[in-house]
Amino acid sequence: QVQLAESGGGLVQAGGSLRLSCVVSGRPSRNYGMGWFRQAPGKEREFVAAISRGGGSTYSPNSGKGRFTISRDNPKNTGYLQINSLKPEDTAVYYCAASNGGWGSSQAAEYDYWGQGTQVTVSS
């Protein structure tokens, strides 16, 4: 059984940076495409970034480019999301997800495994 565990969230001032981690256990992370999503209070879950199983392909919406960087270290079975120039509107619970599809997707429905989430709060 595949399990994902996020960490690295916290309270940070606007303009700061965070690196979120997602440890995959139960199966090698190299088997899965990975993605990051976030959900703010009262809002729908939103896609942030995705990465293919080998790490050679990444995707992030235009709104996130330049501030969100997704990466992975398969020998460590860990995925990462670097967030720079944080804004109060980035406040949300951030979730990592893994897809059997392997190539990473912007669609939440295409992910098979989800972590419990890590809270990111950005103060102004």
Image (cartoon, grey):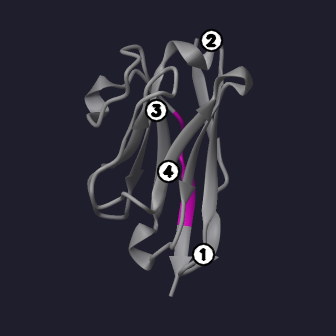
Residue 97, disc: 3
Q: Amino acid at mark 3?
A: Ala
Q: CA distance from mark 3 to mark 2?
A: 14 Å
Residue closest to the far right: 76
Decide: marks 3, 2 in contact (CB < 8 A)? no
Q: Secondary structure at mark 2?
A: loop
Q: Quadrant of the N terminus?
A: top right
| Percent position of residue 84, x then y | 53, 66
Q: CA distance from mark 2 to mark 1?
A: 34 Å
> Looking at the image, is mark 2 or mark 1 nearer the viewer?
1
Q: In the rendered view, would you say 93 is above or below 55? A: below
Residue 124, disc: none
Q: CA distance from mark 3 to mark 4?
A: 16 Å
Q: Which residues are magenta?
A: 115-120
N-terminal-most mark, 2 or 1: 1
Residue 69, disc: 4
Q: Which residue is depicted at the point 36% across and 64% down? A: 41
Q: Amino acid at mark 4?
A: Thr
Q: CA distance from mark 1 to mark 4?
A: 14 Å
N-terminal-most mark, 3 or 4: 4
N-terminal-most mark, 2 or 4: 2
Q: Amino acid at mark 1?
A: Gly
N-terminal-most mark, 3 or 2: 2
